Amino acid sequence: MQIKNFMVNQSLKELTQHRTVELPIACYETAINQNIHGYIPLHWHEEIQFVLIVKGEAIFQINEERLAVREGDGLFINSGCLHMAEEKEGTGCVYICLNVSPHFVLSQELFTTYVFPYIQATNLSYIFLDGHELWGNNIADAILKIKQLIEGKPQYFEIDITMQLTVMWKNLIFNGFQPEHIQTEMLKSQRMKEMLSWIQLHYAEKIMLEDIARAGGLSRSECCRYFKRILKTTPLNYVLEYRIQKSLILLQQAESNVTEVAYQVGFNSTSYFIEKFRKSMNMTPLAYKKYKMDESILNLADITVEK
């Protein structure tokens, strides 16, 4: 199963319920270029996430860091960490993703000692899972087994999943990852989420740098440093790109037109919207709209033929 678009709240927290009726865990096989945005947008969730690349290569950003993850390797992404992913051009990246409630990793009696300190750690936003290392390969195998269990649902599969999760967690914490808890780092993360939350609420309005900085309780210069360090861009450039991403969904509506969409997402000039859209997407908004409409017609025709 793949989620091609997902909703987030004002703080960029993903709203998808990553659980089944039986288990607080969800498994997805994701082709990055199939997402409605063409990449996996910035978001976070309370669940921990395990990623295994099964084809191609992806560039992940987790909080302030960017790294390439190739076929056979993976990632552990910690609870509450901002992250996004894009395909390394032309590789057709596909990855398996497990989102797991931290409370499901180990029993309640062991959670306080062996899970909670790690999901609260400020030095463990992610862990790279090297498929060439024995412990990394053990985790990769467990991810694949859990995927098979969720899809096949053999008898007692829920118990087997918990056994595999225990193997994964033991391999993580037995390989020297010592948790640290630095209050200033926790505050930085919270301030960043507050600024992103404010932008999501007000992106269609006129936005000044002072407004964004005020939302995070920062000066203008410190606000710029936060965005440069974490998102590798300026606050106002982030707003610009966010508006363009919001326009993608509106442009796919049959009744929409470019001028209306431009104003709905906060641009006060259609020509400026077209200019920035072309720079970001390598095509005009109208060309994008036509491309998506043609794609929808082809998909509908494929479904009809299958029937």
Image (tube, grey):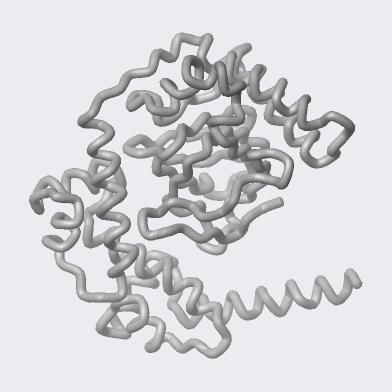
The answer to whether residue 131 is visible is no
Residue 95 screen position, x and y as percent: 63, 41
Image-based side of 109 in relation to 23, left or right: left
14 shown above or below 145: below
Foreground pick, 183 / 238:
183
Quarter containing the C terminus = bottom right
96 shown above or below 163: below
Image-based side of 302 in relation to 76, left or right: right
Residue 116 screen position, x and y as percent: 45, 24
Q: Would you identify the image quadrant in which residue 265 lies?
A: bottom left
The answer to whether residue 113 is visible is yes
Q: Would you identify the image quadrant in which residue 275 lies?
A: bottom left
Residue 126 screen position, x and y as percent: 44, 29
Foreground pick, 135 / 10:
10
255 shown above or below 183: below
Residue at (43, 74) in percent of width and height: 247
Residue at (67, 76) in percent of width and height: 296
Residue at (84, 29) in percent of width and height: 156
Residue 120 screen position, x and y as percent: 39, 28
- Give the residue at the far front of this rendering: 109
Residue at (62, 80) in percent of width and height: 293
